[in-house]
Image (cartoon, rainbow, N blue to C red):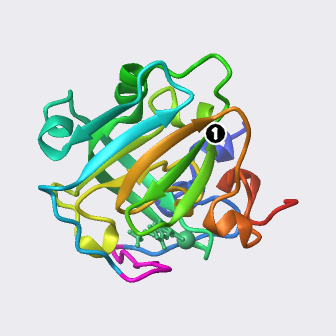
Amino acid sequence: MAGPTRGFTGSARHRRNSRLPPGQYDVGSAYPVLTAEVTPDVDLSEWKLTVDGLVAEATSWSWEEIRALPGSEFHGDIHCVTTWSKLDTSFGGVSVDTLLDAARPSAEATHVLVSSTTGYTTNLPLADLRGGQAWVVWTHEGQPLPREHGGPVRLLVPHLYFWKSAKWVSRMTLLDHDEPGFWEQNGYHDRGDPWKEQRYQGD
Ligand SMILES: Nc1nc2c(c(=O)[nH]1)N[C@H]1C(S)=C(S)[C@@H](COP(=O)(O)O)O[C@H]1N2
Ligand SMILES: [Mo]
């Protein structure tokens, strides 16, 4: 008699590994820091997040205003292009959908250029920030987001390589074309889907 289908009887370890995109390893409980610039000290009394560009209403939120929006959490995995993945982690903040719904993107908006207070930038298709796939977050595993990980407030786009998740996020500008950000100008992919191994331009 034929046994059960192999795919349903794999070990827990195998199932866990099957969550790793190609070329990635499980970093375990570690949480590496990857920062290209000097870690800024962001003053929350002056911090704001702006959504502008091709929107009906350019909108900014102060720290108090953004925390008054309906909250949203992410539980899942993150994948850095340097090949580490961190499984089963969590972040809390607000869905990017909530912010975009307030600013109302114009019909011609197709891409977003995200900026940090430091000048770091990264570009994404607008569709990757929509549909419950992206967050602006200020907690990690229930604690305030540490400065080195982008605190007080960072972007989180966990279905793309983690360089798209701008730390110390301050602006999202909607465009009708794609405009390469910091790493993308330096050879990294414009979309960065880890399951398609879109690491570099041309992948
Ligand atoms: N402002 C800013 N955001 C950034 C980066 C950066 O250097 N500066 N590094 C990116 C990269 S390459 C990764 S892997 C993640 C790292 O986030 P972490 O340091 O919290 O692990 O942040 C992304 N966002
Ligand atoms: Mo990264």
Query: What's the residue type where badge 1 is placed?
Result: Pro
Kindly report the secondary structure that dominates the magenta region of the rendered protein: loop
* Residue 131 percent coordinates (x, y): 50, 26
Q: Going by the image, does 200 lie left or right of 74?
A: right
Q: Going by the image, does 183 lie left or right of 102?
A: right
Dot 1 alpha-carbon crowd within 10 angstroms: few under 14, some 14 to 19, many 20 or more: few
* Residue 81 percent coordinates (x, y): 62, 69
Question: Mark 1 = which residue?
Answer: 4
Q: Is mark 1 within 8 Å of ligand 1?
A: no
Who's the residue at 61% across and 74% down the image?
A: 83
Between residue 166 and residue 161, name the one nearer to us. 166
Q: Is residue 173 above or below residue 116?
A: above
Q: Label 1's element?
A: loop
Who's the residue at 46% across and 78% down the image?
A: 34
**In which quadrant of this rendering is ligand 2 seen?**
bottom right
Q: Is residue 93 above or below residue 34?
A: above
Q: Is residue 19 above or below residue 177?
A: below
Who's the residue at 75% across and 52% down the image?
A: 196
Between residue 15 and residue 73, name the one nearer to us. 73
Residue segment shown in magenta: 29-38
* Residue 18 percent coordinates (x, y): 60, 55
Identify the image quadrant of residue 58.
top left
Q: Is residue 14 something that shows in the picture? A: no
Q: Is residue 87 above or below residue 104?
A: below
Identify the image quadrant of residue 148.
bottom left
Who's the residue at 30% across and 75% down the image?
A: 40
Taking the magenta stretch, the answer to whether it contains residue 56 is no
Taking the magenta stretch, the answer to whether it contains residue 34 is yes
* Residue 161 percent coordinates (x, y): 59, 59
